[in-house]
Structure formats: C-alpha cells, structure tokens
Image (cartoon, rainbow, N blue to C red):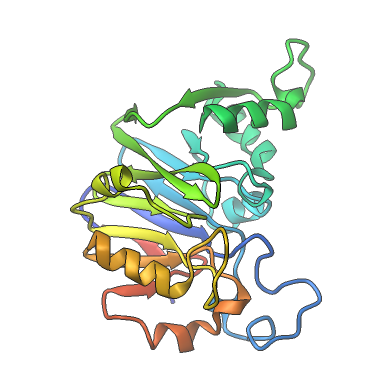
C-alpha cells in the first residue's frame, strides 16, 4: 500500500528509486537487508518524479530509469534535472529519448557546466550533427546556481559538495531534493529555509567520505528545519527499513521505491 501525504496544491512526487549506486539487493550479497522479503527493502537507484498541473520532470536518470518509468506508468516528461554525472545518476539517460519522440521535440536536460560536458562526451552520439534513425534527440541546457523556470515551475539549483565534487540539489516551491551530499555550504542552507518537504541522502550508519550518514542527515534536517523530511540514497548497510524507520524522529521518514507524496 502506498503512503500518500498532502504536500500542497502544487506538486505530486513519486520516489522512483531510493537506493545507492549498487541498489538493493546487492549482487552476491546475502545480508539480512538484501535477503529481506519486505518490498520497502528493495531499492533501485535514486531518482524522483515531480509533477505539477502543467509540468512533469524527473531528477536524475540512473541505470534503472527505463523500468522505473514503466513500473510507475509515466507517459509524459518535460525535462530531466541532473544532480551530477556518476553513472548511478545518468546511465539511463538514453531511454529519455522516448519522451522526445512522444513530445515531438528535443528532450531538455538541465545540468551544470561540468556535468553538461561529461554528458556530451559520454553520450556523444546524441549530439553529433550527423543523425541517424533511433538517435536520442536531446537539448542540453547548461545551468548555474541561478533560478530558472520549466513552464510554471521555478527551479532553484542548490550547490552542495559530494566530497570534493560540486554537485546540485534542487528546490521547487516548498520541496527540496538533496542527494549524494557530504556537505551543504552556508549559502545553500539559506536557500533551504521554510521547506515543507526535504529529501536528503543518508547512505549508512558508519562514516563515509562522500555521503551523509544517518546521524549526519538527521543533524542536517534539524539545522534546516523542514516540516517533514524523507531519507533517500540508502545502502544495505543502513539496515532494514522497518527497524531504521522505528528509530527516527517523528517528522523524519525513510523513503522507499514507489512512495507517493501528493496533494
């Protein structure tokens, strides 16, 4: 049964994936999380779907993107926002070509300058002047930390650090999505005030060089003070969903694949 929570009049959200780069279950692993029969312990790579009355977009297109889209019966997307270009966040980008065909126009991809360059290199065939049948029809739009609009949605990029790699989170209205962060600079924290919903990464219990731990994520949530927070980008090292969820403060929840937050 999907949990539905009122976010407001503006947007519906679906967590397409809430796992880290290996997903859960991890290939070859026999830990209690990977062997769990609880569907909430089965996690595809992190991505989220955002829909308003006029606009539908996705944040990140990892290797599970095609199945996430099919499983959630999503038939329209206006754009993709990219946080960074590690493979668990862009490996499924080629499958977004279907939405260019559906929309009968190039599919917009929003990414910062470094990420845009990597996308151009790794998907070079999609940006060549010589085009052949079946090639993706993408429109790569380079962004910085300044707000921009996709139809009726104001998107505010939130610069964060993934160890030494500058990446982007995004704020849309009173919702913000931060993944793969190990640090949020003070200027970015100012952009995260007065949130109804914060989604933030919590990789595992023990320290990691490039990701928030569970304790660090909770501390960051207490600093930002959203009305509600959801944890994502979780590994099997975090523990069983029901066990971890039972220990969280009352306004913090474990996201899971297929979770809907809707008005």
Quadrant including the C terminus: bottom left
The picture places residue 36, in percent across and down from the top left corner, at: 63, 86
Quadrant including the N terminus: bottom left
Choose between 149 and 249: the one closer to the eye: 249
Q: Is residue 241 above or below residue 135?
A: below
Q: Is residue 99 above or below residue 249?
A: above
Choose between 9 and 178: the one closer to the eye: 178
Count of marks overlaid on the render? 0
Residue at figure coordinates x 48%, y 70% from the top left? 213
Q: Based on the displayed image, in which of its 4 quarters is residue 51 positioned?
A: top left
Residue at figure coordinates x 24%, y 50% from the top left? 174
Q: Residue furthest top?
A: 129
Residue at figure coordinates x 38%, y 87% from the top left? 247
Q: Is residue 77 above or below residue 190?
A: above
Choose between 154 and 162: the one closer to the eye: 162
The picture places residue 99, in percent across and down from the top left corner, at: 57, 34
Choose between 155 and 96: the one closer to the eye: 155
- Can residue 83 be seen here? no
The picture places residue 101, in percent across and down from the top left corner, at: 61, 28
- Can residue 219 be seen here? yes
Residue at figure coordinates x 32%, y 59% from the top left? 198
Q: Is residue 8 above or below residue 60?
A: below
């Amino acid at each position: 049964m999907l949990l539905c929570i009122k976010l407001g009049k503006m947007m519906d959200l679906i967590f397409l994936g809430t796992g880290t780069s290996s997903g859960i279950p991890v290939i070859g692993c026999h830990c209690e999380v990977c062997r769990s029969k609880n569907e909430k312990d089965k996690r595809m790579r992190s991505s989220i779907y955002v829909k308003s009355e006029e606009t539908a977009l996705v944040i990140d297109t990892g290797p599970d993107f095609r199945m996430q889209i099919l499983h959630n019966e999503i038939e329209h997307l206006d754009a993709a926002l990219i946080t960074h270009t590690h493979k668990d966040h862009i490996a499924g980008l080629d499958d977004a070509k279907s939405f260019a065909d559906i929309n009968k126009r190039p599919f917009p991809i929003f990414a910062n300058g470094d990420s845009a360059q990597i996308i151009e290199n790794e998907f070079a065939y999609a940006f060549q002047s010589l085009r052949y049948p079946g090639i993706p029809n993408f429109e790569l739009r380079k962004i910085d930390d300044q707000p921009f609009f996709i139809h009726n949605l104001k998107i505010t990029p939130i610069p964060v650090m993934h160890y030494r790699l500058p990446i982007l989170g995004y704020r849309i209205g009173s919702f913000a999505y931060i993944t793969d962060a190990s640090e949020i600079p003070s200027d970015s924290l100012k952009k995260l005030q007065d949130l109804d919903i914060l989604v933030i990464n919590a990789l595992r219990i023990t320290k990691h060089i490039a990701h928030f731990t569970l304790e660090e994520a909770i501390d960051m949530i207490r600093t930002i003070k959203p009305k509600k927070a959801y944890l994502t980008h979780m590994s099997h090292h975090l523990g069983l969903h029901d066990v971890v969820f039972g220990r969280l403060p009352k306004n913090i929840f474990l996201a899971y694949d297929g979770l809907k937050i809707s008005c």
